[in-house]
């Protein structure tokens, strides 16, 4: 125990000469102890991690198991169970953890992650490769999760709401270069690869093989990224009409798939446009798409096609904001899906925006008249409580900035957020054990 004169700023252990020193239990942090620890008992029956594991156990992961080369009776080190990796990422997503390195660290520090691992070791390379390398599997699992909810009568897919959100890309604004600069960067990158190969040939023992391999990989990776950026510039030039516009086209050497977009705060930053379609009655995410489009104008029809391909049905009604309601979209969906979207206000305040115009097609004229009714206005209010609410929840779980690069990897991360959200909806409807807010 600490003595009164051992350096404590105030001596509160005595209160006068008539009584002795107070007896207290002090911390002892140098004692070596052997403890009996039961991992399963450390997690309560209502802990959200149990709901995550139940969700994963119900998945069809046969595609992932089929890719494992190590088999019983054969040579090779056993692979990490895909269920463990899937559960780790779903739980991490619900907890707002988006970094593979952070997840790796939590697996050694937090009991919930240790419970998922069950003594199986993981590292950030394995975690990162699993997340970004299985976009097709994650896409199938999203369909599976919605199919289960439809079977249970939770999701009906009769009315959906779609909304997009701009998510910051993992690329700096200074990484964007014009075609002339990109050609120079590509030339320099190729020269660097040639220099490294020459150094290796002249002095193979000059550095360790690992260092040599790392330097050569980095140089080749830069050549590949700059080459993609140059191709990206050429593709974007085709979208421009004037010479001045074409000369101003730029692409990122860090993430060629990213595009500078106008964000919600009015600023311009490299980003991706994440589209999510949500079942209006259950708040279940039924469709996910990611593009480099700066606006939502052309994103409605691809989502409707995606839903038909996934579930074999087209929703009878769709709720979207004014950015989606192009006349061509309304015409294309005529007879299949009723569009509920606000009619833009004309510049002349005396003109009734809901009155059909001479140039309107029958479906556009019907849309204008429909949006003037109280019933349509009431239905459209559901959009804020569905699509916008779901997007906000994804933001709260950490979908503020992508930590991966490339459209395919970004799509995989977006699908993971959708799966985590549907997991929480299943728990909310009592289809899983545990609690997942």
Image (spheres, rainbow, N blue to C red):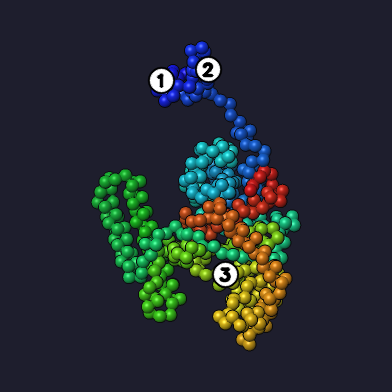
Q: What residue did someone put label 3 on?
A: 299
The secondary element bearing badge 3 is classed as: loop
Q: Position of residue 184 (x, y in %)?
A: 30, 66
Q: What residue did someone put label 1 on?
A: 6
Q: Is residue 200 visible?
A: yes
Q: What residue did someone put label 2 on?
A: 23
Residue 40 against residue 209 in the figure, above or below: above
Q: Position of residue 18 (x, y in %)?
A: 51, 12
Between discs 3 and 1, the one toward the N terminus: 1
Marks 2/1: CA–CA distance: 16 Å
Residue 414 against residue 22 in the figure, above or below: below
Give the side of residue 113 with respect to residue 150, left or right: left
Task: Write the residue at 67% across / 75% down.
Answer: 371
How many marks can you see? Answer: 3
Between discs 2 and 3, the one toward the N terminus: 2
Q: Position of residue 308 (x, y in %)?
A: 66, 67
Farthest residue toward the bottom? Answer: 358
Give the side of residue 199 with respect to residue 360, left or right: left
Say which of 269 and 378 sits in front: 378
The secondary element bearing badge 2 is classed as: loop
Instruction: Classify residue 290 by image quadrant.
Output: bottom right
Give the side of residue 39 with respect to residue 293, left or right: right
Task: Write the residue at 47% across / 18% down.
Answer: 1
Task: Write the residue at 48% across / 41% down.
Answer: 105
Between discs 2 and 1, the one toward the N terminus: 1
Marks 3/1: CA–CA distance: 71 Å
């Amino acid at each position: 125990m600490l003595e009164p004169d051992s350096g404590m700023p105030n001596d509160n252990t005595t209160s006068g000469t008539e009584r002795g020193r107070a007896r207290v239990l002090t911390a002892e942090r140098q004692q070596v102890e052997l403890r009996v620890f039961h991992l399963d008992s450390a997690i309560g029956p209502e802990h959200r991690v149990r709901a995550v594991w139940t969700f994963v156990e119900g998945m069809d992961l046969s595609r992932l198991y089929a890719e494992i080369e190590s088999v019983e009776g054969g040579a090779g080190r056993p692979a990490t169970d895909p269920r463990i990796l899937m559960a780790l990422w779903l739980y991490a997503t619900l907890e707002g953890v988006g970094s593979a390195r952070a997840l790796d660290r939590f697996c050694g520090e937090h009991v919930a992650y240790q419970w998922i691992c069950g003594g199986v070791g993981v590292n950030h390379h394995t975690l990162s490769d699993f997340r970004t390398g299985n976009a097709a599997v994650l896409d199938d699992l999203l369909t599976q999760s919605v199919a289960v909810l439809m079977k249970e009568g939770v999701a009906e897919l009769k009315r959906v709401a779609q909304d997009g959100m701009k998510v910051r890309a993992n690329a700096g604004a200074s990484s964007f270069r014009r075609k002339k600069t990109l050609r120079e960067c590509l030339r320099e990158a190729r020269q660097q690869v040639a220099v490294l190969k020459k150094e290796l040939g002249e002095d193979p023992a000059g550095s360790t093989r690992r260092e040599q391999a790392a330097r050569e990989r980095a140089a080749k990776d830069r050549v590949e990224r700059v080459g993609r950026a140059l191709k990206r510039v050429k593709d974007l030039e085709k979208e421009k009409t004037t010479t001045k516009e074409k000369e101003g086209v730029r692409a990122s050497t860090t993430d060629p798939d990213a595009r500078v977009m106008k964000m919600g705060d009015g600023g311009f930053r490299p980003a991706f446009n994440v589209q999510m379609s949500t079942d209006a009655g259950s708040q279940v995410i039924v469709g996910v798409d990611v593009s480099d489009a700066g606006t939502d104008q052309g994103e409605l029809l691809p989502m409707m096609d995606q839903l038909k391909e996934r579930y074999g049905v087209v929703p009878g009604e769709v709720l979207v904001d004014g950015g989606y309601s192009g006349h061509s979209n309304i015409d294309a969906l005529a007879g299949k899906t009723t569009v509920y979207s606000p009619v833009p206000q004309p510049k002349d305040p005396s003109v009734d925006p809901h009155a059909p115009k001479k140039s309107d097609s029958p479906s556009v004229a019907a849309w204008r008249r429909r949006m003037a009714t109280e019933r349509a206005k009431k239905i459209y209010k559901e959009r804020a409580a569905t699509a916008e609410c779901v997007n906000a929840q994804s933001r709260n779980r950490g979908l503020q900035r992508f930590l991966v690069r490339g459209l395919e990897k970004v799509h995989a991360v977006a699908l993971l957020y959708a799966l985590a959200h549907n997991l929480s909806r299943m728990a909310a409807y009592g289809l899983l054990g545990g609690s997942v807010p």
